[in-house]
Image (spheres, rainbow, N blue to C red):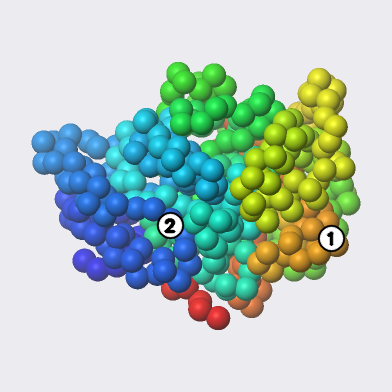
Amino acid sequence: MTDLWRLPAADLAALIKSKQVSARDAASAALARLEAVNPQINAVIDHRPEDVLKQADAIDAALARGEDPGPLAGVPVTIKVNVDQAGFATTNGLKLQKDAIASAHNPVVNNLVKAGAVLLGRTNTPAVSYRWFTSNLIHGHTKNPRDPAITPGGSSGGAGSATAAGIGHIGHGTDIAGSVRYPAYACGIHGLRPTVGRIPAFNTSLPERPIGPQISAVSGPLARTVNDVRIALAAMSARDVRDVWWMPVPLEGPKLPKRVTLCVNPDGLNPVPEVVAALRDAAKRLEAAGWTVEEIADTPPMQEAALLQTRLWLGDGYEAQLAAAEKEGDPGALACLRGNRDKVHPFDLSQTLARRAALTRQWLLFMEQHPLLLMPVSGMLPFADQLDRKDEESFKQVWHAQLTQIAIPFFGLPGLTVSTGMVGRVPVGVQLVGQRFREDMCLLAGEAIEAGGAPPSPIDPVLG
C-alpha cells in the first residue's frame, strides 16, 4: 500500500490495528514524505529517523503480543518546539534556548505517546511564539505549502505547514492568541484551541511563565479532518497531575439543540467580503444539515478583552521579555514587543484579572443563550508573509484583524477553525466558539460545515 501519509489518522490507526499495514510502514512513509517536501517549507526543524522507526517497531511489537497500543496506534504526529520532548531542545524559536534539553515529556506529549502515536519531528515556531508568522534566527523561515507568499500562520506555523503538506497526520500546537486556530486557517486545515484545563501541559526544561499566560495558553491539535481533531483531542486530554489547571470533565456533554448563532462582525472587526461570504456559506451548510442558525448583530465586548489578553500575554514581565528579545536580536519578536509597548506597559496584574472576571462573567451569561457561535477566524484572508514587519500601519492592521484570535482565550472558551474553501490560492474558513468544555458541539457543527467542502489536503508545496 502506497501513500500512507495521505490517510486520515483515524483510517491509518485502523489499518495498523488490523495489521493490514505495519506501524513501521507508516513511519517509513512519513519519513519519506518529510524528506521529500520539508526542504521546500522548513516546517520540521528537528527529527531523528532511527528513533522514529524504533517507536514504530514498539507499536508493532505490542500488536504482535495482542496488546492495544491506543487510539492513535502507529500514527505519526509532530510536536511544536515550544513544549518538552525528552532528549530534544525546547527552543521556542530562540538561540538562547538551544541547550534547553528536556529530560521528560510534557504531559501532552506523554499523552500522545500513551495513545500510541509515533513522534515524527519537531515543528517550527516564531521566537517566543509571539507572532502569526513563523521565522526565527535559530531554525529559519517556515513557508505555507499552499502559497509561499502568504504566512503559514503562527505561532504553530510549522505544525500547520507540516500537516497541510502531509508531514504527519496530526500536528500539536499551542494557542494563547490564535496560535493553533490561525495556522489552521492560513494552511487550509482544521485546528482546535480547547477549553483551559482540558489538555494538561507542563514544561520541566524552562521556568514557568507568570500566571497570566500560564492559565491562557493551551495545547491543541491541527489536522486535515475534523474527526482527526476529535480523536487527537481525546488522546491529548488524559489526566496528568503535573498540570494544576487540568479538569476531569467528560469529552461529551449533555445533549444540546443543534442551534448556532452567527455573528459576522463582532465588536467592530469589519471583516473583508471574502470572510463574510465564507461565514454565510457555512451557515447555509449548517442549515442544510438540520441546524438552526440565528444571526445577531454583535457579541459582548471583545476589543477590551483582546487588549487585556495582550497585557496578560506581554505586559506581565514586559521589561524582562524585551531585554531577552534584544539579547536574541530576533526582529519579529522585537516588532511584537515594541509595537505593543503602549498597550501593555506599565501593567497592573490585579486590575487586569478583576476586569477579566467581569468580562468573562458577561460572556458566560451570553453563552447560556447562545451556546455555539459562528464567527470569523480573522478579519482578513491569510496575511502576506511577514506583513507585521512591513510598516507601522501594517502592524496595526494585523493586530486588529486578529480580534477573535486574541479575545476568545481571555474567556477560556474553546474555538475551532474549520477551513471551508479557497480564494484563488489562499484558504478561507470560519470559527466555531462553544461553551466551556463543549468542544464536542464545536466538532459536531464543524463536521457539518466540513461536509460541504474543504480545501484539498494533503498537498504538494507550491514553489512560487
Q: Quadrant of residue 401?
A: bottom right
Q: Is residue 35 left or right of residue 133?
A: left
Look at discs 2 and 1 and give the one toward the viewer. Answer: 1
Question: What residue sits right under mark 2 in the picture?
Answer: 44
Q: Quadrant of residue 87?
A: top left
Q: Is residue 72 visible?
A: no
The reply to whether the C-beta atoms of the residues labelled 2 and 1 are less than 8 Å apart is no
Identity of the residue drawn at 58% across and 62% down? 152
Identity of the residue drawn at 29% across and 65% down? 32
Where residue 82 sits: x, y (%)? Answer: 51, 42
Q: Which mark is residue 392?
A: 1
Label 1 SS: helix
Q: Residues within 10 Å of mark 2 (few under 14, many from 20)?
A: many
| Quadrant in which the C terminus is drawn | bottom right
- Upstream in the sequence, badge 2 or badge 1? 2
Q: Residues within 10 Å of mark 1 (few under 14, many from 20)?
A: few
Residue closest to the far bottom: 464
Where residue 333 sits: x, y (%)? Answer: 67, 50
Looking at the rendered structure, the kind of residue marked 2 is Val
Identity of the residue drawn at 35% across and 63% down? 34
Looking at the rendered structure, the kind of residue marked 1 is Glu
Q: Nearer the viewer, residue 409 or 232?
A: 409
| Quadrant in which the N terminus is drawn | bottom left
Identity of the residue drawn at 55% across and 47% down? 94
